[in-house]
Image (tube, rainbow, N blue to C red):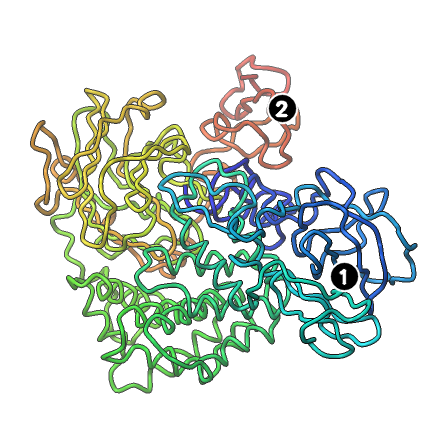
Amino acid sequence: MSFRGRGGGGGGGFRGGRGGPGGRGGRGGGGGGRGGFNNNRFSRDDGPKNIIPLGFYDYPCQEDLVAKVEVENVPFFNAPIYIEGEKQIGKVDEIFGHLRDFYVSIKLMDNMKPDGFQPKQKLFIDSAKLLPLARFLPGNQTRKPAGRVGKPGGRGGGGRGGPGGGFRGGRGGPGGGGRGGGGFGGRGGGGGFGGRGGGGGGARSCGRGGAALTDRKISLSDTVDELVKETLEIIGSIVDNEPEPPNSMILLHDITDKPTGWIQLVKSLIRVVPLEHPMGPSVITLLLDDSPLPTKDSVLEVADMITHSIRRTPKRERNLCVILGCLAEKLAGPSSIAVLSDVTLGYLLGNLDEGIHPDVMLFSLIALEKFAQTSENKATIKRKLALYPENPLTRLERHIDSKEFILRQVGFCARWCLDNYFLIEGRKYSYEVADVSNVRVMLNTRDVSEYLKISSDGLEARCDAYSFESVRCTFQVNQGCWYYEVLIITPGVMQIGWATKDSNFLSHEGYGIGDDAYSIAFDGCRKLIWHNARSMPHDLHIWKGGSVLGCLLDLDAREVIFSLDGVEGGVLKQVFGSAKDGFFAAASFMSFQQCRFNFGSAPFAFPPKNRQFMSFNDHAELKDTDKIVLPRHLFLEQLRKLSVREDSCTLCFDMKATIRIEPCKHRGFCTVCAAQLQFCPMCRAEIVSTVQEVDPATTSSSPASEDGSEAT
């Protein structure tokens, strides 16, 4: 399972799936957002779960309410606040005051004014939106260490705003708009009339003066840095059945509700995420995609960082390119065109020059590819590339077989761009020159999720999309002992192993190989074995670029064994409870991951020594036409030319539609597809029975039924 959640499901994952109802709006369907974490991860519309008293309205401050908190626990920033009847009036904006005598300011909803509330009026909050005060006491602000498999805990972590506190100070007195009382380690000082305050609290300021929770005060910048670091630390410990995201992500989401917070997150990602972290780029993508959609001004401010940022290092440059690529994908259309200014384009193309750090090259290429998803940007980039004496992509393509794995990724992405986006007149497509004469088994381009990139020889795969992409090979095994190997090119999250045809690819929901009963997978980044969406630890070392994963399947002995660089793990039998035959080699990829498969067309690096086995390549056959891996635009053009019979099944388009569903009476399905359905795809009604509608031309003398159908 990827770090995506399950979109409409319960629990599991870290990255919110795009499907389930109740999630944050955006790409999902059915009212859904990105789902994940029990499908209510950052949902604001589910309503309160358990309303309890928070305190009472004390006095107004500008257009806000100031409330005295009467519970010991501390509310989340942006936590909804209610009055009697569960009517929401606003959200928590500031938290300030003494250690055990603090207040909150409440940003009221539109069309609400402070004079519409009664003094001492009771206010309420969802109990799930409170943190224990102990989290913020000196000596209790430790972070949970990143375990190998352990859960991240509840809403804990390093305290609201990172170790040392981090709550913002209140706003100054009612007459002056200053930066009132010292917040819980926040910006405030004393409440003045019109300033950010000095040492003590001003009379009746929003902050009411008073002591901060700790002596050390944390800026917003430091707070966000700490939360990003915490996310990086625990990223490898988030596995299956997590009820909610880690505390650090919840707090970052709250902070980025405001443009200043979103910009601060971007700046923090640029300076904090290390170059060597195996999931660094994935974490950047995750945090940006789970933050609220930025304003156009905020996005343009990020583009301006190209010219205004200081202390340039490969780490910062790489992270900035990852961010630009994320924004290009997230804001396709006019906003993407606005971001790709002459400065931005010149910066990304300049990063393709010789001597640039390979990581910076790689993510500049990926950013250019994502910008090119908007047709106007694509034309702009092609015009710019045409001005070069030698197209830089053709130079970078030569690294396709490099022993240095970062450069190998650069070569792969350059070739992909040349085949799919930035075509050069007279250049042959890579599938036209690839030598596949000895290849009899490939990754199946007809059995792959939407955004996975497959090399022209069909043996190498890469994912640069936000989703969890999966693929099976072209050869099925039903008996005997089989073995294949995988060269690990990137050390991040991939789930590689075995799957049957019954295993589903639900890339946007975070389901991949090992996430159902019909597959089993090895995860060398998190040191886990996956089956039926549940994980168990293994004792092999963490994989790295250049590691070789061995995958053995013994159907006669009902055993699966994974090995890493020749060292075998334990015997696994779980998958055979649901599947006895019909297995394929298969894999799933998180963002920015790549590997190469060896099905026997080349000698194995670490063949099993203790049993006889067979390789796919020695027993399979592929037609020459089936060895062609078309660029995506040619493949889509080929699909458009296909003619579909009017009576074809609306799901598979292969067989004739002869089934009617009862009781809703929808038609258009073949017998094979109908047998796999529990609910009608048209209306979502439960299927009670199906009716085989017989062609009258073939049954003129058949006594089937009065309406020419047979119940099944």
Disc 1 and disc 2 in contact, CB within 8 angstroms: no
Q: 404 and 486: which one is in front?
A: 404
Amino acid type for the residue under numbered disc 1: Lys
Q: Which mark is residue 662?
A: 2
Residue 527: horizontal and vertical position, in percent?
Answer: 30, 41
Q: 348 and 581: which one is in front?
A: 348
In this picture, residue 51 sits left or right of residue 258: right
Picture residue at 36% right of the left edge, 70% below the top: 318
Among the 4 quarters of the image, the one containing residue 440: top left
State the separation of the CA atoms marked 1 and 2. Answer: 52 Å
* Label 1 secondary element: strand
Residue 491: horizontal and vertical position, in percent?
Answer: 28, 52
Q: Earlier in the sequence, mark 1 or mark 2?
A: 1
Q: 265 and 146: which one is in front?
A: 146
Amino acid type for the residue under numbered disc 2: Glu
In this picture, residue 415 sits left or right of residue 134: left
Q: Quadrant of the N terminus?
A: top left
Picture residue at 35% right of the left edge, 35% below the top: 530
Q: 242 and 7: which one is in front?
A: 242
Q: Which mark is residue 107?
A: 1
Among the 4 quarters of the image, the one containing residue 312: bottom left
In this picture, residue 561 sits left or right of residue 451: left
Crowding near pointer 2: few (<14 within 10 Å), some, many (20+)?
A: some
* Label 2 secondary element: strand
**Vertical placement of residue 666 versus 185, above or below:** above
In front: mark 1 or mark 2?
A: 1
Picture residue at 78% right of the left edge, 43% below the top: 53
Residue 316: horizontal and vertical position, in percent?
Answer: 38, 72
